[in-house]
Amino acid sequence: MKASYTALFLLVSAPFASSAVLTSGHVDVLGFGWDDGDQTIVPHAHVDVGSVVDGVEVTVKTKFDPSEIVFFVPTTAQRSRPSGSQWNTIGGTSGGPVWILPQNQDPSMPWPGLTTEDGELREQPWTGVTPFTVRLTNVVKPPNADFAMFTVGPFGDPTYYFATSDGIGSADQVSVPLNTHAHYNWSFTQPGNYEMTFDFVANHQTLGTLTETATYSFQVIPEPSAALLAVAGSLLVLLRRNR
């Protein structure tokens, strides 16, 4: 297996060498699930049919542990940051480059969302109108880089939920009801690797406040070729079979 590990290291950057690679398609990155055995919430990424993982189109809806998957932000996601003070929270400079996975689907890149639609989750009793909260607690990112998650309203004004340009604090959170399925803009101001840690919090009627932590990985680089991903995917299958 030594040769396989060496080849895989060359294909996927070191921090993400054992992870699957999602390059396009619908994925609820911030997914709330439920573990009936442990009686707690379970953060996961819910990959939809038609998404491309390891260079292969997914034919069955699949849940990934956040540590098992990397989300690629391709060169086609690059934009010029808009001018105006309302966009300063994104980071970077007015007119400078920013890579955005948009809230409206673009089939050439990942379409990340948030969901509280899990079937087992819906069977539990929850407290309050918005019992589910995701809090950004840490981001490991390239030098001088910033990450933000936001929506753009009908008049073009952004509403920010997470942003690193002003530091990470209590404002970096989003709360939603049960049965939510929502999409946001995810922006990155520099190419490179981003590892974002979130607290998933849920208010249960009988178990109280439940909190779980998960780290998600994004890589803002030129999209690898289909052939390269196919080789990487084959090697990952071999590695998993030999664990």
Image (cartoon, rainbow, N blue to C red):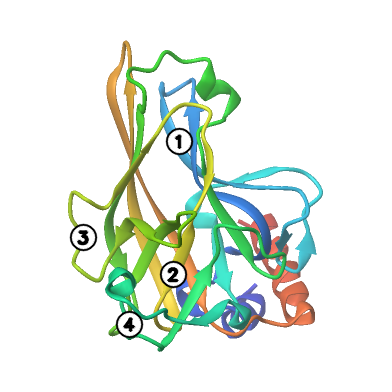
> Which mark is in front, 2 or 3?
2
At 54% from the left and 66% from the top, the residue drawn is: 101
Tag 2 or tag 1, which sits nearer the N-term? 1
Tag 3 or tag 1, which sits nearer the N-term? 1
Label 2 is placed on what type of residue?
A: Ser
* Left or right: 132, with 17 as reference point: left
Q: Residues within 10 Å of mark 4 (few under 14, many from 20)?
A: many
Residue beneath label 2, please?
Answer: 187
In the drawing, what numbered circle is on residue 92?
4
Residue beneath label 1, please?
Answer: 42
Q: Quadrant of the N terminus?
A: bottom right
Label 4 is placed on what type of residue?
A: Gly
Residue beneath label 3, please?
Answer: 168
Question: What SS does tag 1 mark?
Answer: strand
> Which mark is in front, 4 or 1?
4
Q: Residues within 10 Å of mark 1 (few under 14, many from 20)?
A: some
The location of residue 6, given as percent across then percent down, is 60, 82
